[in-house]
Image (spheres, helix red, strand yellow):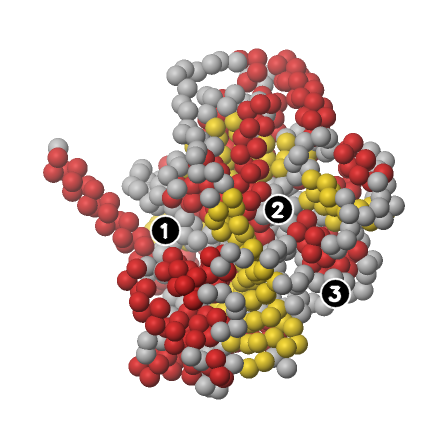
Amino acid sequence: MKKLLFGNEAIALAALHVGINLGSGYPGTPSTEILEYFSEFGGKAQWCPNEKVALEVGIGVAYAGGKSLVTMKHVGLNVASDPLFTVAYTGVAGALVIVSADDPDMHSSQNEQDNRNYARAAGVMMLEPCDSQECYNFLIEAVRLSHEWGLPVILRPTTRVCHSKSIVEFEEKGYSPVFPEQYQPDKPGRVMIPAYARIAHRRLREKLAKIKEWNNTSNLNEEIIKSQDLGIITSGVSYLHVLEAEPNASVLKIGMSYPFPSEKVCSFTQKHKRCIVIEEGDPYLVENCRYYNIPVDEKPEMYRFGELNVVRVRRILQGITTPEPPIIRGKPPRLCDGCPHRATFTVLAKLNCIVAGDIGCYTLSVLPPFQSTDTCVCMGASIGVGLGLRHTLPPEEAKRVVSVIGDSTFIHSGIPGVIEMVYNPPSTGHVIIVLDNGTTAMTGMQEHPGTGRTLDHKPTNQVKIEDVAKALCVENVVVTERISDFQRELLPALENGKTNLIVMRKTCALAKKKIEKFEEKRLEGETCDAATT
Amino acid sequence: MQQQHNVTNVILAGIGGTGVILSSNILADAAFYAAYDVRKSEIHGMSQRGGSVSSDVRFGNKVYSPMVPDEEGDYLVLIHPDELENNLYRMKKDAIIIDISLIVGESKDLNLLKTDNYNPVNQKNFNVCLLGALSNYLDIPYDCWQKAIFSNLPKKVHEQNKGVFEYGIKLKESVKQKA
């Protein structure tokens, strides 16, 4: 069977065919569609409040003996890094594959961190697919490796791999998820008290040494010998740019970049007069080569930034370091016509608020005509940053500070910030504004615990933001739906010296119709239930 | 520097929500049904919010990079006329540009499609019309196009879009070149 698939689609199809028990994750470009496709294909998938919880759920699935797929964007792995480092020690019984979708050039991200560094730091196997076929093959291989070695595996596609289509050949037969009959305990293996963790760390390093040995001969790393003069060492989508840019060179494509197959790389370099590493992002492969004293050339620093492409690879190979022509990016994204955030930010700009902002469509309010967001660091940071500003600025300035956060971001990592506000209130008080548009809009309108619907839009329990705030003892909690009410509530809250949380609730203009349909279905379901009881 | 032979490079460009992704899916599928190697690449995410969106579709005997290298674009399909300047630098000197002026003339006024004058072409489906115009230049059989249009659109608009595509095929005469 042959199909033209997106990388994300190929990962989802492989997950279905390999019998993943549960896919868990948090939406984030460019990873979002993986779980949506998986659910559409018939797999069981769910959005979690954040990536840390998603990974913890995945760990539980794999401890129970199931096969788990956990998906997130690169910065999501920062949130999930706490469980990541320790599940490397405990290992897993079934299989645990984490997809970290990196975003070189920050097409839709706040940084372009290279998550290959996480594999090395945590001691977790890492596979780097270059296209949809490899997304399919490598996901299946990752599940196999995870089960065989009893360790987690990270699959690292990048934006160009996730959001590119190419042909995938596959067999249509698949495996259904297998559910274990009972729990198989392993207390010394899974309870990381220091005494057990010391043993676990040594066990991990021993396994990694063996995997490294295996990786030196594994067919995940592909060698094409064409020349004795030039050899190119590469990984991920850069491999495809290399094949096009320099068809006469030999190529070593690293499919498993951690543990680093140093002997394989060393023997490749010995076959060539000159070897150069072509890799996107950080000099990860280069640094590994340096560690093992493998002589390779590297790209000039200017190519660390952004994505590689055929033209840039040609320039690197020719040693060109003159300034590149600027990338023409066209019109920047903006808040949609009819977006409810527009009115809110107009008010905040008019009141001259200092806005500690957050991650979501509303970050776009930093651009004209609003120019009203002052800070944006990471998911949930608006609240802590806003509090810090209030603690430090003189009272008249402090009273202008508000924290602005979206509904999905609030659930993701805003709640500990609310607790901080209640526990350590600034002397001028504080105002948190939750922009509740009823969806995770920026990543393409995904559900979250606040919508009361699951990933596949079925009704479930709903977490109400205002109830959470009240339960956390915020002094003044109000919900507004009209902009005039919002402004009326905001003005005194800025000055009242209390802890305030204002929910500005208005549905995303793009999601509105869809949400109405889902809610109609819910009502139909409730009527049916009432009729049968 | 050796270029890839026998690869056709098409760039489709517009604004988020205007059908860039849909039309590039149709083109990529049509090339796939015609048994070519195909790669397609695009950037979406935040670009949904009214920003520039473009999609690269490449097909031939063997395609490597999913992105059309700068100055190697053969065809530029403009789904929004404002996107011309942003994409010209990516095209070959003799590239062919297919845009809304084929349908409504030099004014490039999308609002003209609100009238019945271009029936069955309208503001929603004119991207399929542009694909029809493009199809005159590509070695992709008609039935592959039809299959691709049908597999990407809901059944109730199949016949209409077939008509729109055929309307586009007849627009060949007025296509112009970059130079």
What's the residue at 68%, 31% (across, down)?
A: A218
What's the residue at 33%, 45% (across, down)?
A: A457
- For the residues labelled 3 and 2, say whether their Cβ atoms are less than 8 Å apart: no
Tag 1: residue type? Answer: Gly
Q: Earlier in the sequence, mark 1 or mark 3?
A: 3
Query: Looking at the image, can residue B146 be seen?
Result: yes
Mark 3 against mark 2, which lies toward the viewer? 2
- For the residues labelled 2 and 1, say whether their Cβ atoms are less than 8 Å apart: no
Query: Could you give the CA–CA distance between mark 2 and mark 1, rounded to whole angstroms?
Result: 36 Å
Q: Give the residue at mark 1.
A: A438
Which picture quadrant has residue A410? top left
Which residue is nearer to you in this view: A328 or A333?
A328
Q: Report the chain holding disc 3.
A: A
**Residue A475 image position (x, y, % from top left):** 39, 43
Query: Could you give the CA–CA distance between mark 3 and mark 2, rounded to whole angstroms?
Result: 25 Å
Q: Do marks 1 and 3 share a subunit?
A: yes
Q: Is residue A172 above or below residue B100?
A: above
Tell which residue pokes out farthest to the right in this image: A273
Mark 2 against mark 1, which lies toward the viewer? 2
Category of crowding for the residue at label 3, using alpha-carbon neighbours closer than 10 angstroms: few (below 14), some (14–19), many (at least 20): few
Q: Disc 3 on helix, strand or loop?
A: loop
* Direction from residue B120 to residue A220 in the image, left or right: right
Tag 3: residue type? Answer: Glu
**Residue A312 image position (x, y, % from top left):** 72, 59
Category of crowding for the residue at label 1, using alpha-carbon neighbours closer than 10 angstroms: few (below 14), some (14–19), many (at least 20): many
Q: Give the residue at mark 2.
A: A130
Query: Looking at the image, can residue A87 be seen?
Result: no
Tag 2: residue type? Answer: Cys
Q: Give the residue at mark 3.
A: A324
What's the residue at 57%, 37% (across, down)?
A: A138
What's the residue at 12%, 35% (across, down)?
A: A532
